[in-house]
Amino acid sequence: MSLRTTFPGSWWPYPDLHQDLGRYHRGELPHTEGIAVINECASRAIAEQRDFGFDEWTGGEYFADTFVVHMPRRLTGVVIEQLPEPDGFDYDDLGRVSIVGDIDAPRGLGYADAFRRENALPGGVSKATVLSPFEMVVTALNTHYDAFEAQLPQLCRIVNKEIKELAEAGCTHIQLDAPIIGARINVGRLTSKHAAEIISSCFDGVSGVIRGLHLCNGNNRGRPGSPVLRNATWVPLLQQLDGVVDIAHVEASYFSEYLERQAFKDLPRTMQLAAGIVDEANYWVESVKKIKERAADWSRVVGEERFWLSPSCGFGRHSARDGDREVLHAKMTNLAEAAASF
């Protein structure tokens, strides 16, 4: 059989729509015109992912500004101290917020609204993502971590509410995006037990859907956010999420992570593995042969029946240059061919 394929979340930018998309995120477009722009982006992303033959596809996350930049504008209890750089290059360009009170999201986080809108487009949407509590206030973590810890139960409730809204709206696969959890485990700043409690809270009472979890070491303009590039360290976390998470989507693109694949033999039997083998952050296009070899090695660990092939992360931090899209398109073409060859 062919290997199943999935996609992490954000799709690539479109040069002809990039300026209008930026105007939408800055609030410079009338509402109707702005919705038309993000719907056009989502329609293209859905069509392209389906054309590649992916088993699952997303709406591309165009409603979200650079993964996390939009989030403070949806929250109360936080103050924006520094605006993000318009053409941000690194992690310190994401802006800065402070936590000044009880955090809430009276308008929701936007993911359920986006799914309902995108699911009405041709092809619909089969998968949607939601940020973990860490990503919601990521730019406050270094200076306001105690305040974050105090607000963590409420942040988990906000995420849980959004996930339940997605499930009620008919989304079949809901993925919690948790790169900071993966990175903090790797540098020893978060225990697997505490991380499992947070993730379990986010999925509390959610059933009848595929519950996904994306773990990586961060990616901003092709650079990780963690100095430790491992993934075997996440297996103890996944073992504690038996019955909570159905598909673990893990970054597996670095050679150091590939070398640790045998650790995933201890993945819970109820859990499937989506291995992010194709490195979206690297501008060297992996050959079909190399992708097949890596996929075969990983699938031998967990079994082809539990294995999905995927890129390592989404494409939302890439520029709108045609050259970027050409490289990413070539990578996805080779990924699809490799998956179909099994």
Image (cartoon, grey):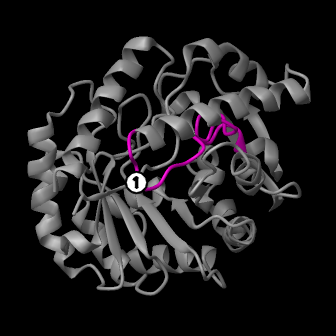
Decide which of 196, 320 is in the foreground and name it.
Answer: 320
The answer to whether residue 260 is visible is no
x and y, in percent, of residue 114 in the image: 73, 48
Q: Is residue 177 left or right of residue 115?
A: left
x and y, in percent, of residue 123 in the image: 60, 47
Residue 122 position by quadrant: top right
Q: Is residue 255 left or right of residue 282?
A: left
Type of the residue with mark 1: Thr
Q: Is residue 269 above or below residue 300?
A: below
Mark 1 secondary-structure assignment: loop
x and y, in percent, of residue 78 in the image: 79, 49
x and y, in percent, of residue 194 in the image: 48, 77
- In this picture, which residue range is highlighted in magenta? 52-71
Give the quadrant of the N terminus.
Answer: bottom left
Decide which of 92, 125 is in the foreground and name it.
Answer: 125
Decide which of 120, 294 is in the foreground and name it.
Answer: 120
Q: Is residue 127 left or right of residue 165?
A: left
Is 70 a magenta residue?
A: yes
Q: Is residue 196 above or below residue 25?
A: below
Give the quadrant of the C terminus.
Answer: bottom left
Q: Is residue 184 above or below residue 244?
A: above
Residue on which the image places disc 1: 6
Q: Which residue shows up at 46% across the image and 41% down it?
A: 49
Count of numbered tags: 1
Q: Which residue shows up at 22% across the image and 66% down it?
A: 232
Decide which of 170, 185 is in the foreground and name it.
Answer: 170
Classify mark 1: residues with Cα within 10 Å, few (<14), some (14-19) or many (20+).
Answer: many
Q: Is residue 89 above or below residue 136?
A: above
Main SS, magenta region, reads loop
Q: Which residue shows up at 81% across the image and 27% down it?
A: 34
Residue 306 position by quadrant: bottom left
